[in-house]
Image (cartoon, rainbow, N blue to C red):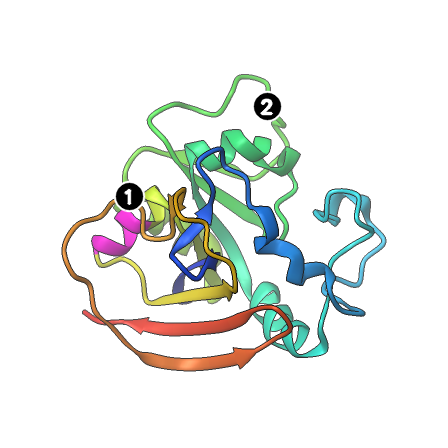
Amino acid sequence: MGAVIMHNVMSVDGFIADDEDGVGPLHDWYFNGDTPLVESDDPDYDHSEGAGGFRLSKTSAEYVRPMWNSIGVIVMGRHFFDLMNGWDGHPPTGDHVVVVSHRPKPEGWHPEASYHFVDDLAAAIAKAQELAGDRIVSVAAGEVGAQIFAAGLVDEVAIDVVPVAFGSGKRYFGSIGGMHRLAEPHVVVQGEGVLHLRFRARP
């Protein structure tokens, strides 16, 4: 089975969004270069919110593109799903989405989309790994992602650190308590306006 990687863009003080779910400048680096992240003319796969597609620095694109291409399934919490309306049934990468939620998929919501609603953390990861096969399971950071991490179900932690301090907001590691050690970073890539880091989780 492929690796389970918790992933998100983060401020230097540990936040993935502000108190109102705004991301401010966290995603600016997706648009500060001239290298397209996804070479596709399909508007369903342009998640740049009308910005004409993601265009990264060459260094960031060379790091992000192979990772995105290797993702088979995204795992997310219900709050993130509701906030994004599940990307209208078209995830930015991967073929499937698993939503951790005690509530079922909204009635009539994109019945053609391969979205699966599971109400248990371990069952959600098991379903995601089944769907992903040898490809990566990407877990969105935040409250649900942190719970999956604390349960020992994450193999790696990937963080794109942006030089901004939010002061308050939604934390990358949610509200989990206690200390959780990671291995030394095995990937360190300096992009333009972002530092890409990957750590293996310790058992």
Say which residue label 2 marks: 109
* Residue contact at pointers 1 and 2, CB within 8 angstroms: no
Observer-nearest residue: 138 or 118? Answer: 138
- At horizontal 44% and vertical 32% (from top left) the residue drawn is 79
- Position of the N terminus, as image quadrant, is bottom left
Q: Residues within 10 Å of mark 2 (few under 14, many from 20)?
A: few
Which residue lies most toward the top here? 107
Residue 130 left/right relative to 153: right
Q: In the rendered view, would you say 71 is above or below 113?
A: below
Say which residue label 1 marks: 121
Callout 2: helix, strand or loop? Answer: loop
Name the residue type under label 2.
Trp
Instruction: Determine if the magenta segment contains residue 181.
Output: no
Q: How far across and down, in percent of the image, does residue 87 sit?
A: 62, 38
- At horizontal 33% and vertical 43% (from top left) the residue drawn is 143
- At horizontal 47% and vertical 41% (from top left) the residue drawn is 18
Q: Residues within 10 Å of mark 1 (few under 14, many from 20)?
A: many
The answer to whether residue 169 is seen in the rendering is yes
Residue 156 left/right relative to 88: left
- Position of the C terminus, as image quadrant, is bottom left
- At horizontal 43% and vertical 62% (from top left) the residue drawn is 12
Q: In the rendered view, would you say 121 is above or below 73?
A: above
Number of labelled discs? 2
Q: In the rendered view, would you say 170 is above or below 4?
A: above
Q: In the rendered structure, which disc, 1 or 2, sits on the residue that comes first in sequence?
A: 2
Query: Whole-Å distance between the Cαs marked 1 and 2?
Result: 23 Å
Name the residue type under label 1.
Leu
Q: How far across and down, in percent of the image, does residue 10 sit?
A: 46, 57
Q: How far across and down, in percent of the image, does residue 41 sit?
A: 85, 53
The answer to whether residue 1 is seen in the rendering is no
Which residues are the magenta region? 146-151
